[in-house]
Amino acid sequence: MAATPRKNKTARRILAAGAGLVTVGALVAAMPSAGAAGDRSGGGHGHGHDKGQGRLVDVQLLSFNDLHGNLEPPTGSSGRLTHLNEDGTTRTIEGVGGVEYLATHLRQARQGHPYSITAAAGDMIGASPLVSGLFHDEPTIEALNRLDLDVTSVGNHEFDEGARELARMQNGGCHPTEGCFEKGKRFRGADFPYLAANVTNEKSGKPLLDPYFVWERNGVRIGFIGVTLEGTADIVSAEGIKGLKFGDEVETINKYAKVLERKGVKSIVALLHEGGLPASGAYNYDCDSPGPGNGISGPIVDIAKNVSPQVDALVTGHTHQAYACTIPDPAGKPRTVTSAASFGRLYTDTTLTYDRRTKDIVRTAVASANHVVTRDVKPAGDMTKLIDRWKTLAAPIANRPVGHIAADIENPAGAYEKPLGDLIADAQLEGMAPADKGGAQLALMNPGGIRAPLSHKASGAEGDGVVTYGEAYTVQPFTNMMTAVDLTGAQLVTTLQQQVSGPNQAAPKILQVSKGFTYTLDMTKTGADRVVVSSVRLNGEPIDPAKTYRVAMNEFLSGGGDGFTVLKEHKNKLVGASDLDMFTAYLAAHSSASAPLPVPAADRITVVK
């Protein structure tokens, strides 16, 4: 008899259970046979009634990715989507997302579909707004349980607090240092399995989490293989993943596709936390024009072209982009590859036609489309109560005013220099500039660490233009410690070049820079040549390759994160306060109700296109 995941949490064997904290270098314990752990079948959630007893059965796959704990409706640019009109023009859709509305849309979509699965492709938690992040993302796991999520892969952000904390997200239990957040309530953990087939113990080679999951209803069996991007180790804190290895996505998916085939599961979906970059930012852009998959680039393209034809669909994430493409598999057959942007603004509805005789998906019948999570539907009452409960707990901290702004300070996707990036870099420079604090002369901020804009419109009763601690936390939720380090001018130039070369060449990671630091990016060139070396200046003076400069950055960057390997060569590191503390201190020092902070000009990086 198939075991339902909601009733069989003990079957979810996670290596971290019973192990010491990864953050102090201890590794998760060895796992029993992956086949035994992964050979669980889920009975689904009982959406509708079984009507499909014929040979062909339409299975509805609802999917999303990169929620990042956005329980409340995201604001500013994080709560918008671009719609492509038939005439080629675009329009902006304001006010989308929010788990109350996502729940309603998913529940409505399931109606009339007796075979319905809800799956996700990672980063459900991590880099979360305060209402979830303050409580180590317990609220988001609770919300996902109520959403009837069947299965998800892990993303890189699931490792933000280390493998032991990820195990707690799965298995439940109160936080090891902060305890239980609600009196008389013990965190129950996720009702759905987290999959991480390519995350293994370096010594034993065994998976950290279940590598796959089998969903079953009335003889219809669909296997899910979950992986995160191989480069996770480069974009999360090294302390949290000590002793873990992140394997090749294609090799891992192909390996477990064979395992599932041997077990008689021929219908297979890969949940992959890696993604692509469509040619248009519009959620409804046709990335199969002029031919299948021609309108998309990025890592997912090569992955999709090499993943075994045994896999029938790929649900992806990480890049926060929206697409529903058909990229040919190694046999040349079209295969659906989807992503639903981020923050719960979209969900993907894919129809998988299951053939009872062959036990496989009829690939030619697969259809996918992204749907907007509008806020013109009735919000789900259970989600509203959940959010209100946690907001009440967070209120004493979240509602404290920390500054004032004159207008929206945006963090626009795709922009090389962002107004909010300038503001944060300036705050970090000011915090680390005093001689006894590090003596920093400039600051560098990684763009991925800026998670949301600052909106002028009030989110509560604080009044327009008031920045609360909760809003500042949403912008910088990682609470990274700041450092000041020695770098030579040559290393500084190499840092700029690594923004647009090596692993960052296809998708540049442009560091946000503090006032006085200027240079030119020539995007008509390729690789490191995009940085015009002669243009790099500090306070108007050309950077001297042989001179030593004191540079402020967070510990993620000084550890070489995001592909900035040269930053690991720093010397004389001094650790300061957290990035969030410096951000709120800067807002308090430089703004008031009568003199709100203006929007930065974003004029430090000159871009030639």
Image (cartoon, rainbow, N blue to C red):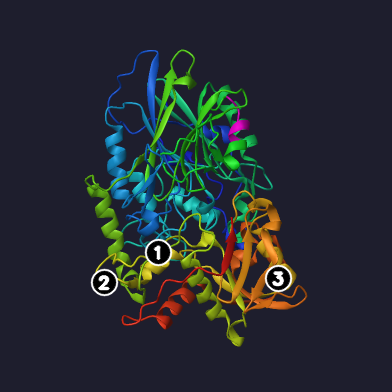
Q: How far apart are marks 3 and 2 (CA)?
A: 44 Å
At numbered mark 1, what does the secondary structure look like: helix, strand or loop?
loop
In the picture of the structure, the residue carrying the numbered disc 3 is: 570
Q: Where 506 falls versus 577 (above or below)? A: above
Q: Which type of secondary structure does the marked residue at label 3 adopt?
A: loop
Which quadrant would residue 373 be assigned to in this image?
top left
Dot 1 or dot 2: first in sequence order is 1
Q: Mark 1 points at which residue?
A: 134
- Taking depth in this image into account, of 12 and 118 the one nearest to the observer is 118
- In the image, taking residue 389 as reference, residue 478 lies left or right, namely right
Instruction: Write down the region rendered in magenta.
Output: 303-309
Q: In whole angstroms, how far apart are the C-alphas of marks 1 and 3?
A: 32 Å
Mark 1 crowdedness (10 Å alpha carbons): few <14, some 14-19, many ≥20: some
Q: Which residue is drawn at 41% across and 46% down?
A: 190
Q: Please, what is the three-letter code of the amino acid marked with disc 2?
A: Gly
Quarter of the rendering containing residue 133 = bottom left
Residue at horizontal 27 percent and vertical 64 percent from the top: 392
